Amino acid sequence: MQDTVPAGTAETANQAVQSARLVDLPDWTPEPLLRGWQMIEEQPLLAALVVVVLAFLGGKLIQVLTRRGITRLTARTKTDLDDQVLALLHRPIFLTFFFGGLAIATRVLQLPPRLIFFLAAILKTILAVIWMITGFRVLKLILEALGRNRKRFPILDERTIPLFDMFGKLLLLGGASYFLLLIWGIDPTAWLASAGVLGLAVGFAAKDTLANLFGGLFIVADAPYTLGDFVNLDSGERGRVTHVGIRSTRLLTRDDIEITVPNAIMANAKIINESGGPWEKERIRIKVGVAYGSDLDQVCEVLRQLAIDHPHICTDPNPRVRMRGFGDSSLDFELLCWIDEPVLRGKLIHELNMKVYKSFQQHNIEIPFPQRDVHLRKVEG
């Protein structure tokens, strides 16, 4: 007769094996493998080494499978942004799986519970920092890619990308800090409440700084000027915008003097942007008076021709001459012409004034000056 094994004996043995294990294996794990793992667990150092090796190999396998699978998907896209993001994620994915194996190895070594918690918290902290740094790099790649496509994302340019980068990093840092508190068993509720009270105190103490911060946000959203623009403030300053920061805006005047204006003032000031409009070109006006009796057609032709002959005066739009009125001593004319950059305004006005005077002398066109007749009368007594 063949010996019969009572029903449930195999299940009882399987449960006994699982109860003796330090690491829970899946229920579908074959019984021989369970018994082999039990034998390995009897040697904690060997078991820990096996777990670490398996975690390393598993991490490499997942890294390779992820790379191949996602590479097939990214190959169908026109941009290389996804390829760059994938390259940044390879290392964190591998380290996540490998550190998970290290955490299991600490349990296999049968270390004290407090030490296991401490080592696991350290591993999780390192992972949180690694993923946060990876998030910083991915954020930078995404912002740079979106900044290059200004037609679809006009809000992203050279001056706004650092702002979005800073806010993105603050969000990532805040999320990482929250998870770190959870990792170390610290209740974040009390910390968040304290942060709220501290935020109110800081808000009252640094209201000017916050006003400048929000002013910078309004400038970014409204975009009254950009880097390189020539602006005039209602206080009289005129210069090129060299920096738009979170707290202030810097102008470089024609005297090579840098002026720093808080954003709270810039957000509420009347700003004349000479570089704004459909183009950067700017129109200048040369006012001149000629004597009554002058040949008006000749005056218009001389003024228009000297503007056309100047190398730094735009031919599109063409220079124009307008007669503005009848003065007390002169017929008032204006030469209207366009220049490429606002920075050239002072120099070209000087050169055109010089040319007007010399051309009028050559063509015998008189520039009158005010004259007064004084009549003396003798009073009796």
Image (spheres, rainbow, N blue to C red):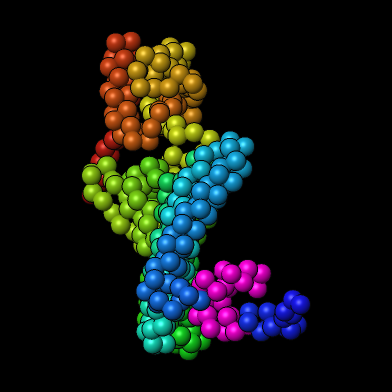
> For the point 44% across and 39% down, which residue is it?
275
> For the point 69% across and 83% down, which residue is it?
9
- The vertical placement of 307 against 6, above or below, is above
> For the point 50% across and 58% down, which residue is it?
58
Residue that extends furthest to the front in the rendered view of this protein: 1
Q: Quick check: 336 left or right of 345?
A: right
Residue 21 part of the magenta-drawn span: yes
Residue 127 visible from this viewpoint: no
Answer with the quarter of the image where residue 360 lies. top left
Which of the pair 105/149 is nearer the observer? 105
- The vertical placement of 340 against 48, above or below, is above
Q: Quadrant of the N terminus?
A: bottom right
> For the point 52% across and 39% down, which residue is it?
80
In magenta, the rendered stretch is: 15-37
* Residue 172: % across, % down: 47, 65
Q: Quick check: 146 left or right of 230?
A: right
**What count of labels does the image hold?**
0
Residue 76 part of the magenta-drawn span: no
